[in-house]
Amino acid sequence: MNDPGASRMIFETGAVSHVGRVRRQNEDSYVVRPEFGVWAVADGMGGHENGALASGTVAAAIGSIGPADSAPDLLARLEDSVLKANAELRRAVKARGGAALGSTLAALLVHERHFACVWSGDSRIYLVRDGRIVQLSRDHSEVQELVDRGAMTPEEARRSPRRNVITRAIGVHDTPELDLDNGEIQGGDVFVLCSDGLTGHVEDAEILTAVRDAGAQPACEELLRLTLERGATDNVTVVIVRNRSDDGLTTRWLPNRRRPGSNTP
């Protein structure tokens, strides 16, 4: 049950999703359900139709998890939704003769003052706090593993032709693998969830500048503008969640603008 005396918060959310300048279909999807304390980005893989199906399946499952009684309950609901989406995608793979099908996931869960970040693949979650930006997620990718072993520098990883080869995704294996980070929210915290279509063109410092200088939706628009200006070789999706502390247990969010080729459940 919610603690009546717990600190209460207001959340401002912005979101954009765009097909980019090269792809013909948007294989990204996102979830914005502040009333449940759930936000997510999913980036599909497996070609135009399969990629959109994969990310849409994951987003639809997560978007329907409903209200939770506690932080552990919310996490359990998220994990259950991922298992269901994974099973649905595995059935689709078999029905399509083994065709590649899967989706990354970057999800933010908030219950009272607690947050959890859950991810699989290379879609990212950042936290902006006290004027600094920190990547909470860790890419599940071939180049990240090489960076972790000291065999490649972060700059070499950004330029590598295999930078988009991921090592985890929902729907690829019978049992999905998720990583988790969690903590307590502070006043003014900003979370940025994004597909690799953003981070392939925009530096972390530029993300920090965008969220520091504007509200959630304008910051999303600015990051999309930078990506499109630099070629937008992939679909790009950004969800920004800003904590605006208040004494009323409410959530608010700015209207999400659908972009050409956007997928929203």
Image: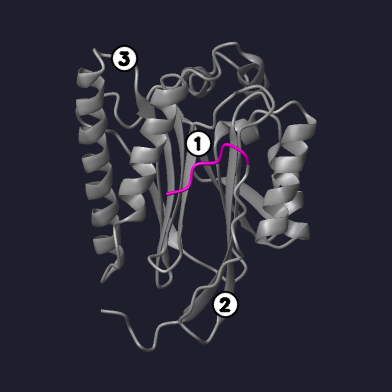
Q: Main secondary structure of the magenta part?
A: loop
Ranked by sequence position, the earlier of labels 2 and 1 is 1
The residue carrying mark 1 is 28
Q: Nearer the viewer, mark 2 or mark 3?
A: 3
Label 2 to label 1, Cα distance in Å?
A: 31 Å
Q: Is residue 219 left or right of residue 14?
A: right
Q: Quadrant of the N terminus?
A: bottom left
Where disc 3 sits, the SS reads loop
Residue 5 screen position, x and y as percent: 39, 88
Q: Which residues are magenta?
A: 260-265
The residue carrying mark 2 is 245
Q: At 23% across and 34% down in the image, what residue appears?
A: 88
Q: At 65% across and 49% down in the image, what residue appears?
A: 133
* Crowd band around label 2 with a 10 angstrom C-alpha radius: few (<14), some (14–19), many (20+): some
Residue 90 falls in image quadrant:
top left
Q: Nearer the viewer, mark 2 or mark 1?
A: 1
The residue carrying mark 3 is 99
Q: Amino acid at mark 1?
A: Asp
Q: At 66% across and 60% down in the image, what residue appears?
A: 216
Q: At 77% across and 38% down in the image, what residue appears?
A: 226
Q: Amino acid at mark 3?
A: Ala
**Residues marked 2 and 3 touching at CB (< 8 Å):** no
Ranked by sequence position, the earlier of labels 2 and 3 is 3
Where disc 2 sits, the SS reads strand
Residue 251 screen position, x and y as percent: 50, 73
> Is residue 52 visible to us here?
yes
In the image, is residue 122 part of the stretch drawn in magenta?
A: no
**Residues marked 3 and 1 touching at CB (< 8 Å):** no
In the image, is residue 263 part of the stretch drawn in magenta?
A: yes
Q: Is residue 91 above or below residue 111?
A: above
> Is residue 205 visible to us here?
no
